Amino acid sequence: MEYKLKPISQGGVSEAVAKAELYRNLNQPEEAESICRDILALEPDHQLALRLLGLALTDQFTGGLEDRYAEAETSFGRLADPYEQIYYSGILHQRRAKAQGQAGRPPHLLRVLLERAMQCFEEAEKIRPPGNDDAILHWNRCLRLMESLPQAGEPAWEALSAGDDPPV
């Protein structure tokens, strides 16, 4: 017997989005990813599903070769709002740096990723909606992460995740 994915109904999209958000908050990004894919199968340009898919993918980063960095980048790149594209690109680089740091990658590689994230956050800050300081908050976090990076030969990767992990 051949199995095929079943499509969700148009009327179920809002509830599916809420479930994807809930699963991310429960630290179950694989569930959130699956739901987002169901939404995007019905509405390929659903902006919230694209954002949640990218975030769910970055929630799964381990710093290994299996990380689906390019897939998350593509998801964020399909966001229509220029601010969101740039801001979430920064999130992508920041989370990749953290995952690679926890995997034991050298600090000089992490600095490159954190600097790229900071560049994205600086760009996003210039076009941010009034009262939205998210890009500034993440820029500051990246700077603190860079300042906490160990010097050559000093293991201190715990600092990279201090309070910035996905919700449990």
Image: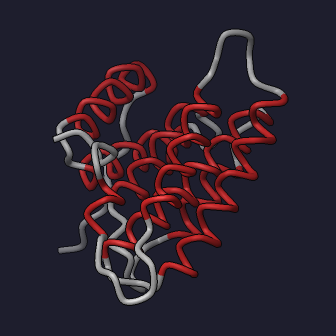
Task: Name the image quarter holding the N terminus.
Answer: bottom left
Q: Residue furthest top?
A: 131
Up the image or down, 18 lies above or below 8; here it is above
Up the image or down, 16 lies above or below 106; here it is above
Of residues 35 and 69, the one nearer the viewer is 69
Give the percent coordinates (x, y) of residue 37. 43, 50
Residue at the spot 32% in from the left edge and 35% down from the top edge = 20
Res 85 quadrant in image: top right
Of residues 162 and 91, the one nearer the viewer is 162
Residue at the spot 53% in from the left edge and 73% down from the top edge = 110
Horizontal placement of 119 versus 5: left or right? right
Residue at the spot 38% in from the left edge and 76% down from the top edge = 63
Give the percent coordinates (x, y) of residue 131. 67, 10
Residue at the spot 49% in from the left edge and 49% down from the top edge = 144
Give the percent coordinates (x, y) of residue 124. 75, 36
Res 16 quadrant in image: top left
Total marks in image: 0
Give the percent coordinates (x, y) of residue 32. 31, 44
Task: Name the image quarter holding the C terminus.
Answer: top left
